Amino acid sequence: MFKIFPLSNLIKNSLFNNQKILVSKETTHGNITITENAGQYNIFDNGNLFFSTDNNILSEEYVHYAMLQHKNPKSVLLVSGGMSGMIYEILKYPGIENINYIEPNPQLIPLLSKYIAPTIDNRVHFYNGDPRKYIKNAKEKYDIVIMAIADPTSLQINRLYTLEFIQALKECISPEGIVLYGITSAGNYMGKEKKEIAAAMFYNLKKNFRFIAIIPGERDYYIASDSTVSIKISELSAGWEDKNLYVNPYYMDDESISQRNDFILNSIKNHRTINTDERPTLVFSHSMQFISKFSQTKGWIILLPLILLLTPLFLIKSYARGMFVAGLTASSIEITLIFIFQLIFGYIYSAIGVIIAVFMGGLAIGAIVANKFTTFKNTLPMIILLLAISIAIVPVCFRLMNNIDKFAGIIIILINILLPSFLTGFLFTTYSNYLSVEKINAPTLIYASDLFGSAFGVIAVTVYLLPVWGISNTCYILAGINLFPLFTNYRR
């Protein structure tokens, strides 16, 4: 039936107006959609435009703004964007000996190769996989590193913008090496969120490199090096007028670039935002920026669902509040651990089914084991305390996982998921068995409280706690909240 009436294709066609969808594929790194319009191919990653072919301006800016800063670039690391024409631009430099091109989503190049022929040159080497892992294990030093990646609108992309990643990036460049990032242009106005995004980019780089230059263009390009960098692109590109269509002294205006550079620097001077693995502030800032496009009262858009989900806590019976809190902490720690998994390993789509299965299995095992206990008064405080402890030790495990192999890290993640879910299932059955003796409707009320608490936890952690407070503080807050039932009347 779905082959006759391809509902999914109709929905996707409505999302890409005036474009022909060539392929839409679910991968371990998310959905890839390739469309065609007037001979131009557009690549979308999870619904967001990744890049378009034949965009000469963007390709030239990304490449030459970095390459022109170096006297004789020989080795280049290009992270994403190679299929958009950037490799061709890099090969314009006669001294190039080696180009390593990393594509974060390993299935993008095979899919796109059906429509765009990859550049064939002995100096170009293709790599599929996680850029963080590649750079962490890199042996050679690069003269130029071009991060042609999407904006950090998701936790997955944000991994390539954090302070820890930039520190690793510095280790794989030569003493006079250049690093370039490009983010969506600020234009002529910078709201609060855009200032925070720009500040995070600037100060993350400033903590690792002596010199930072910002060159506004199709995107705002942040160029970092321990050697001198310049924003005078017109002057640097002298002699390239026959090689470039756009980045050349006849088209570039150094005075205009300087004025826009000063505008950005003056706008962020009162901000000191830092984006780290533990505290992904850029994701939160991008979320707020997106919301601000549709409403000036963005605070209420976030708070309203939280208020609605928190309201039952004040209306339900005292004995059900403990389950509300348990559901809240259990779902919150599950989301936190999913984020940690993605942060460390770089993908989540192929593993999320296993994570959820382990979580649900823990709930079931906890419920079965709880039936073996009948002493409510002595058992419940101990289980609540154990749940708080299991959450509080997650930051310790997170730091440990950064220094062990992949298999051991996955095992630790699964144990950290299994333990809280087991204790939550134990609490649910304990509450239900004890209270249903005299309160017939207790199990249904406890179940509803669990669902309300779980929904509240997912929203609160995803939208606010993790991006603003970070992993460790989020876990400590959740552990503290979980102790709430110990100070309330959880008896009949």
Image (tube, rainbow, N blue to C red):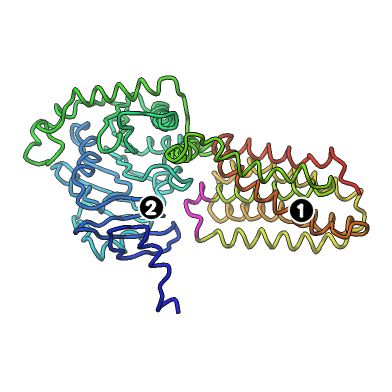
**Can you give x and y, in whole percent of width and height, for residue 294 in the image?**
44, 41
Mark 2 nearby-residue class (10 Å; few <14, some 14–19, many ≥20)? many
Residue in front for this viewpoint, 133 or 435: 435
Quadrant holding the N terminus:
bottom left
Marker disc for residue 104: 2
Q: Nearer the viewer, mark 1 or mark 2?
A: 1
Mark 1 nearby-residue class (10 Å; few <14, some 14–19, many ≥20)? many
Q: Is residue 253 left or right of residue 239?
A: right
Q: Is residue 368 left or right of residue 200?
A: right
**Can you give x and y, in whole percent of width and height, for residue 90 in the image?**
19, 44
Q: Quadrant of the rendered structure where residue 19 is?
A: bottom left
Is 344 one of the magenta-colored residues?
yes
Give the residue drawn at x 25%, y 34%.
Answer: 217
> Mark 2 belongs to which amino acid?
Pro
> Mark 1 belongs to which amino acid?
Leu
Would you name the residue on which mark 1 appears?
423
